[in-house]
């Protein structure tokens, strides 16, 4: 090609990056990589586990052999982490911060080596590993070096969890590792991390950096292996927290495998994020946005904007521009600095992408694919756009995890929201409109953990990242991410409780007129669907009354009432506050009745009065918080803002304990209501009457029907349908079998919160911001400034 041709075509020449330094590093390890345990390279407790190959997806060539860890090796790593943890936690925050700072500096010094090794191992363009993955990883260590120092003064009520097990995927190997390790170490935990089988190399290079930084032995342990190694980590009894990033299917399995173990859990899972282009958007900018949203990292991005929604009026024009741009993308050698798209991670993933696209075409989609040439010896797949798809098509619903975009049109903003939310996932969304009012109106309506306005794929260590629905729970980054690695001092997660034995339905009669209290559903008193009751005894074992024995149909009715009654969630904080003060006032008018009820169960007069008085105060406490639990504007390195908004979770099912039956009921109900949630409360099984009486307060306090629903019955029988219900978004278990609840909650990956013996009368246990945090989820809305 001569200069004239080049000027005519504007084609880029090759600009290859040398792999030499990375290959040299591998050679230093004889291309055979060991685990990093207790500050040293170890081939594992059982040397016969064997090795597997790590290959370059762009060429199919073997880069190195990687050691496979079994349960003994994992145990060895956990023991090292356990030994190191108390001393690491006891270091001053400043000293821990210095280690993180040293790691950041060494990452920076070796950034080119990391970028090249990552590209060789993963197949992503060097432009991306060099300019995005590695700088963001460095940023995470700098940011968290600061948190290590500040936690002591800023979060004095919290402490480290202990040993944490971390499992990461192959799409951003170094970056996902940084997202996990930096906050874990900053908060005083020690780590056992498993990189993905396909991409272990940068994790091992990172371990070497930690060795150079003088990180104490055992603080970081890297074990390599396949999914079975991950399973050993998940099941290890001495690991106190699991942080997982990967597919929803494995995340669901982990939720079930850790149920009832008391392990803390955060899950960053799959996505099918909407990319909404309104008619008034800057279409050329939006086209570039789509390129970044779905063709960055070959579309192997959890938050990829893989569902394009374009307003009908501009759809044809937009598709034309997009297809034109798609044909200009350059695909090829990932080490070539001038290519746009590199290789798919492995042939299996390539085939999965191809078969899903074929299924889409078979179902009637119109296939638009780049005609660009690409190497035939590696694992490549062209950028693809599928139009003429329907909302229920597999290609629209399933995460393809490749460079495949599906496109649908909408007419009105409401239709765009309905289409965007028609997904089991809820990781991210991108909204493009020159009308900022419209974009800011849509952002809270879209069910996602992150919303980018006129931008996409923005991430930073100072802003939380994570999803809702089947995209998982928990956040990584920002202050919100730190909580995932901390527990409240003195309070541990609840371990398995023996389920209550269901009582006999053949109950002894109560003398006199029947006063069996009803349950409360959709703003009305209701009898149990099954028509059964159970006996309620006082603390001396004397029969005092019966209560309705709720069943799964009552659960269904209560959840339906809560899910469809959205008035409470739409009220502003000031309106909710007034209602909650009114509830406190109305409880105060009835304080004698409520105290009498408590005395009937065995409280003495003073105890009963204290409990009622504290309940009134607690209602006022959360009424006060309604308009004060503010979000934050994060300081991200962007000409713009990232707003962390506290949103209600939706419908929360709350199982109340037997201790302090009125106060514990109020202490759980009030924070959930204050933050705008609707609730299905299951009253204390032994002493349900205080909770059932509370409908009188609700009825006289302007609480919209369906906001609060109260069931009675056997907690174990009610737990299963509540925890498994797809319309319940979170479940708090203070009174029931946490194993069952956490296991069943895996259906829609709802958040669960279980806690051990709380002293409800103590303000430092029975109330506080932890309750508000559990009642909300953070949505980060990113908006750049300027033209
Ligand atoms: P997975 O197959 O779920 O693998 C993720 C990690 O879990 C790997 O290290 C894997 O090991 C390990 N693993 C597999 N089975 C396991 C088990 N039963 N117990 C414990 N660990 C197990 O996901 P992937 O294919 O690597 O990654 C793609 C998925 O990750 C996509 O769904 C994507 O959306 C999601 N992802 C999410 C995010 C966030 S932040 N939400 C970020 C990146 C990726 P091996 O690989 O060695 O088998």
Image (cartoon, rainbow, N blue to C red):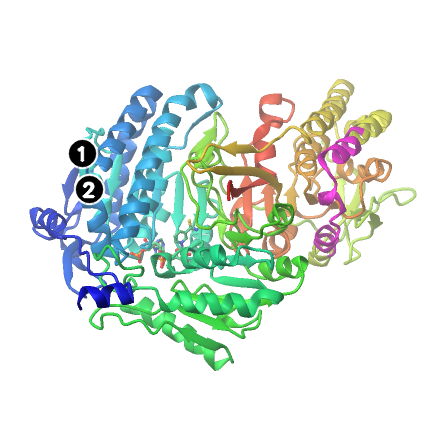
| Image quadrant in which the N terminus is located | bottom left
Q: What percent of the width, then of the height, locates residue 351?
A: 33, 72
Asked if the magenta segment contains residue 323, the reply would be no
Ligand 1 contact, mark 1 (Cβ < 8 Å): no
- Residue ID for mark 1: 211
Mark 1, Cα crowd under 10 Å, few <14 / some 14-19 / many 20+, is: some
* 451 relative to 330, above or below: above
Q: Are marks 1 and 2 in contact (CB under 8 Å)?
A: yes
Element marked by disc 1: helix
Which quadrant of the figure shows ligand 1? bottom left
Residue found at x 14% / y 53%: 19
Q: Nearer the viewer, residue 333 or 705?
A: 333
Which label number is shown at residue 38? none
Q: Dominant secondary structure of the magenta stretch?
A: helix
Q: CA distance from mark 1 to mark 2?
A: 10 Å
Q: Is residue 694 visible?
A: yes
Residue found at x 49% / y 40%: 495
Q: Is residue 458 left or right of residue 125?
A: right
Q: What percent of the width, then of the height, locates residue 555?
A: 70, 54
Q: Looking at the rendering, which quadrant does residue 290 occupy? A: bottom left
Q: Nearer the viewer, residue 508 or 493?
A: 493
- Residue ID for mark 2: 36
Callout in the foreground (1, 2): 1
Q: What percent of the width, then of the height, locates residue 275?
A: 52, 58
Q: What percent of the width, then of the height, locates residue 159?
A: 43, 26
Q: Is residue 238 visible?
A: no
Q: Which residues are magenta?
A: 557-581
* 319 relative to 509, above or below: below
């Amino acid at each position: 090609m001569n200069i004239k041709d080049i000027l005519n075509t504007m084609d880029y020449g090759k600009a290859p990056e040398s792999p030499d330094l990375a290959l040299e590093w591998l050679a230093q390890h004889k291309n055979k990589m060991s685990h990093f345990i207790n500050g040293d390279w170890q081939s594992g407790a059982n040397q016969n586990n064997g090795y597997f190959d790590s290959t370059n997806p762009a060429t199919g060539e073997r880069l190195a052999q990687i050691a496979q860890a079994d349960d003994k090796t994992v145990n060895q790593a956990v023991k090292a982490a356990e030994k190191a943890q108390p001393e690491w936690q006891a270091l001053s925050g400043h000293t821990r911060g210095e280690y993180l700072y040293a790691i950041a500096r060494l990452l920076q010094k070796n950034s080119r080596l990391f970028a090249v090794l990552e590209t060789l191992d993963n197949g992503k363009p060097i432009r991306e590993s060099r300019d995005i993955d590695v700088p963001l990883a460095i940023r995470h260590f700098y940011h968290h070096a600061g948190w290590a120092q500040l936690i002591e003064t800023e979060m004095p009520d919290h402490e480290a969890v202990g040993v944490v097990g971390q499992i990461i995927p192959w799409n951003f190997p170094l970056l996902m590792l940084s997202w996990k390790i930096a906050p874990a170490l900053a908060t005083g935990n020690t780590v056992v991390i498993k990189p993905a089988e396909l991409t272990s190399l940068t994790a091992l290079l990172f371990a070497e950096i930690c060795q150079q930084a003088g990180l104490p032995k055992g603080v970081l342990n890297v074990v390599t292996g396949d999914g079975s190694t991950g399973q050993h980590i998940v099941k290890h009894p001495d690991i106190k927290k699991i942080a997982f990033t990967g597919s929803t299917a494995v995340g669901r399995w982990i939720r079930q495998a850790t149920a009832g173990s008391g392990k803390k859990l955060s899950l960053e899972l799959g996505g099918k994020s909407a990319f909404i282009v309104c008619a008034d958007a800057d279409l050329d900018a939006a086209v570039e946005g789509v390129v970044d949203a779905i063709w960055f990292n070959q579309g192997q991005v959890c938050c990829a904007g893989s569902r394009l929604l374009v307003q009908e009026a501009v759809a044809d024009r937009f598709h034309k521009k997009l297809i034109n741009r798609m044909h200009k993308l350059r695909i090829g050698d990932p080490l070539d600095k001038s290519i746009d798209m590199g290789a798919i991670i492995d042939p299996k993933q390539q085939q999965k992408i191809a078969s899903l696209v074929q299924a889409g075409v078979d179902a009637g989609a119109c296939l638009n694919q780049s005609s660009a040439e690409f190497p035939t010896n590696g694992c490549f797949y062209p950028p693809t756009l599928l139009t003429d798809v329907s909302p229920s098509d597999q290609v629209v619903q399933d995460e393809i995890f490749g460079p495949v975009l599906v496109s649908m049109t909408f007419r009105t903003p409401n239709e765009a929201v309905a289409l965007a939310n028609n997904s089991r996932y809820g990781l991210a969304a991108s909204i493009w409109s020159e009308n900022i009012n419209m974009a800011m109106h849509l952002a809270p309506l879209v069910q996602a953990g992150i919303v980018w306005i006129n931008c996409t794929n923005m991430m930073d260590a100072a802003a939380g990242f994570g999803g809702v629905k089947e995209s998982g729970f928990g956040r990584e980054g920002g202050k919100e991410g730190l909580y995932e690695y901390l527990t409240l001092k003195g309070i541990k997660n609840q371990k398995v409780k023996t389920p209550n034995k269901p009582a006999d339905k053949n109950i002894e009669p109560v003398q006199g007129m029947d006063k069996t209290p009803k349950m409360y559903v959709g703003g009305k008193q209701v009898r149990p669907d099954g028509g059964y009751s159970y006996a309620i005894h006082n603390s001396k074992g004397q029969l005092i009354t019966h209560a309705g024995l709720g069943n799964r149909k009552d659960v269904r009715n209560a959840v339906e009432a809560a899910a469809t009654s959205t008035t409470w969630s739409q009220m502003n904080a000031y309106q909710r506050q007034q209602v909650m003060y009114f509830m406190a006032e109305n409880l105060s008018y009835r304080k004698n009745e409520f105290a009498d009820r408590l005395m009937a169960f065995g409280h003495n007069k003073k105890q009963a009065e204290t409990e009622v008085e504290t309940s009134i105060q607690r209602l006022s406490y959360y009424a006060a918080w309604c308009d004060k639990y503010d979000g934050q504007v994060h300081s991200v390195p962007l000409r713009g803002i990232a707003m962390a908004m506290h949103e209600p979770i939706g419908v929360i099912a709350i199982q109340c304990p037997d201790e302090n039956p009125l106060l514990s009921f109020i202490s759980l109900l009030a924070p959930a209501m204050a933050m705008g949630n609707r609730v299905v409360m299951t009253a204390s099984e032994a002493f349900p009457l205080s909770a059932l009486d509370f409908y009188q307060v609700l009825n006289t306090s302007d609480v919209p029907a369906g906001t609060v629903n109260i069931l009675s019955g056997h907690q174990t029988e009610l737990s299963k349908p509540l925890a498994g219900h797809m319309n319940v978004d979170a479940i708090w278990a203070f009174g029931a079998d946490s194993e069952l609840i956490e296991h069943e909650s895996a259906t829609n990956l709802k958040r669960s919160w279980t806690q051990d013996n709380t002293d409800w009368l103590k303000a430092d246990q029975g109330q506080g911001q932890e309750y508000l945090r559990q009642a909300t989820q953070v949505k980060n809305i990113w908006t750049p400034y300027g033209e």
